Amino acid sequence: MRVSVDPERCQGHARCMLGAPRIFDLDDETGQSVVLLDELPGDLEAAARSAADECPEGAISVLDRVQPQEIA
Ligand code: SF4
């Protein structure tokens, strides 16, 4: 599973970081959320989905990994 933050939407109020500090941090320069992990371990998947649901700007996307055989 992967997570991304849309910088066009993120307003930097840190709700994601407070709820899931192993996944999100705020960039010191931009004040926006950044994702700390390229690939999330299974134990963080629920926290990532919760952060996406609770982001008031709808800035967080959660992408399930697509298996190569599913693309064809
Ligand atoms: S909760 Fe959403 S808008 Fe707020 S800092 Fe996190 S990603 Fe950005």
Image: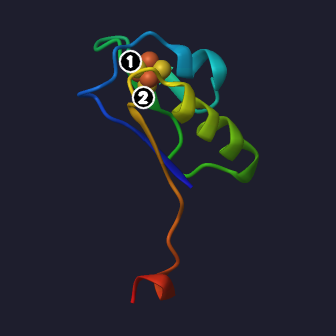
Viewer-nearest residue: 39 or 50: 50
Residue 26 visible in rendering:
no
Looking at the rendering, the quadrant in which ligand 1 lies is top left
Q: Position of residue 56 (x, y in %)?
A: 45, 20
Compared with residue 72, is residue 21 higher up or lower down, i.e. above or below? above
Task: Say left or right for 44 vs 48.
Answer: right
Quadrant of the image for the N terminus?
bottom right
Cα separation, mark 1 vs mark 2, equals 6 Å
- Residue 19 image label: none
Element on which disc 2 rests: strand
Q: Position of residue 35 (x, y in %)?
A: 47, 34
Identify the residue under disc 2: 34
Q: Residue at horizontal 44%, vertical 9%?
A: 13
The first of marks 1 and 2 along the sequence is 1
Q: Residue 27 got which mark?
A: 1
**Residue at image location 52% in from the left, 65% down from the top:** 65
Q: Does residue 19 appear anywhere in the picture?
A: yes
- Badge 1: residue crowd in 10 Å (few <14, some 14–19, many ≥20): few
> Decide: marks 1, 2 in contact (CB < 8 A)?
yes
Residue 22 relative to residue 36: left or right:
right
> Which residue corresponds to the image point at 67% horizontal and 46% vertical from the top-left?
45
**What residue sits 38% from the left and 23% below the top?**
57
Q: Position of residue 55 (x, y in %)?
A: 49, 24
Amino acid at pointer 1: Asp
Q: Is residue 14 left or right of residue 47?
A: left
Whether disc 1's CB lies below 8 Å from ligand 1 is answered: no
Which is nearer the eye, 28 or 49?
49
Which residue is outermost to the left? 8
Amino acid at dot 2: Val
Pick the quarter of the image with the C terminus: bottom left
